[in-house]
């Protein structure tokens, strides 16, 4: 089954988004967010998704999607993405 488009993905409820990202996306790396969250980066075919995880509460509470390679700058210290920069 193909992955949904960015628009179709963003119309899904958060729990469905998280499930699709975890089980169908390609994990790339993670980083520590400004507010203490861990942020996991996934490639979803035609877009990227970030899952925000609160380790203290053991809870994934947000998903952010984007297509712009400029949004990957926060990850440049953690992963080599020369073709996307």
Image (spheres, helix red, strand yellow):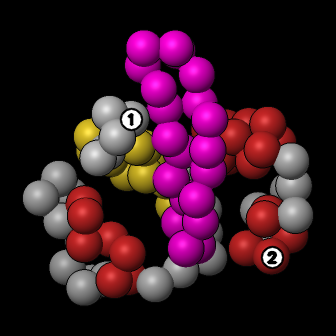
The answer to which image quadrant residue 77 occupies is bottom left
| Residue 19 among those drawn in magenta | no
Q: Nearer the viewer, residue 60 or 30?
A: 60
Tell me the quadrant of the picture where the C terminus can be found: bottom left
Q: Quadrant of residue 12?
A: bottom right
Q: Are marks 2 and 1 in contact (CB under 8 Å)?
A: no
Residue that badge 2 annotates: 7
Asked if residue 26 is positioned above or below residue 68 in the image, the reply reads above
Does the rendering let one see residue 26? Answer: no
Q: Is residue 10 visible?
A: yes
What residue do we see at 69% from left, 40% from top? 18
Please name the residue that numbered disc 1 is placed on: 37
How many neighbours does mark 1 have within 10 angstroms: few (below 14), some (14-19), or many (20 or more)?
Answer: some
**Image position, residue 10 (x, y; %):** 78, 65
Nearer to me, 50 or 44? 50
Residue in view at x 37 percent, y 75 percent: 71
The span shown in magenta is 47-66
Magenta span main SS: strand
On the image, the x and y values in percent for residue 40 come to 42, 43
The image position of residue 50, as x and y in percent, is 50, 53
- Direction from residue 43 to residue 69 in the image, left or right: left
Name the residue at 58% across, 59% down: 64
- Nearest to N terminus: mark 2 or mark 1: 2
Secondary element type, mark 1: loop
Relative placement, left or right, of 43 versus 75 is right
Mark whose residue sits in front, 2 or 1:
1
- Residue 25, image x and y in percent? 60, 50
Circle 2 — which element? helix
- The residue closer to the viewer here, 43 or 72, is 72
- In the image, taking residue 19 as reference, residue 66 lies left or right, namely left
Q: Residues within 10 Å of mark 2 (few under 14, many from 20)?
A: few
Relative vertical location of residue 27 with respect to residue 7 in this rendering, above or below:
above
């Amino acid at each position: 089954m193909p992955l949904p488009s960015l628009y179709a993905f963003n119309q899904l409820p958060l729990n469905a988004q998280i499930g699709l990202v975890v089980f169908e996306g390609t994990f790339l790396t993670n980083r520590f967010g400004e507010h203490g969250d861990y942020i996991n980066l996934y490639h979803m075919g035609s877009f990227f998704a970030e899952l925000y995880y609160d380790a203290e509460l053991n809870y994934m509470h947000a998903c952010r999607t984007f297509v712009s390679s400029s949004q990957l700058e926060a990850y440049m210290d953690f992963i080599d993405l020369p073709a996307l920069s």
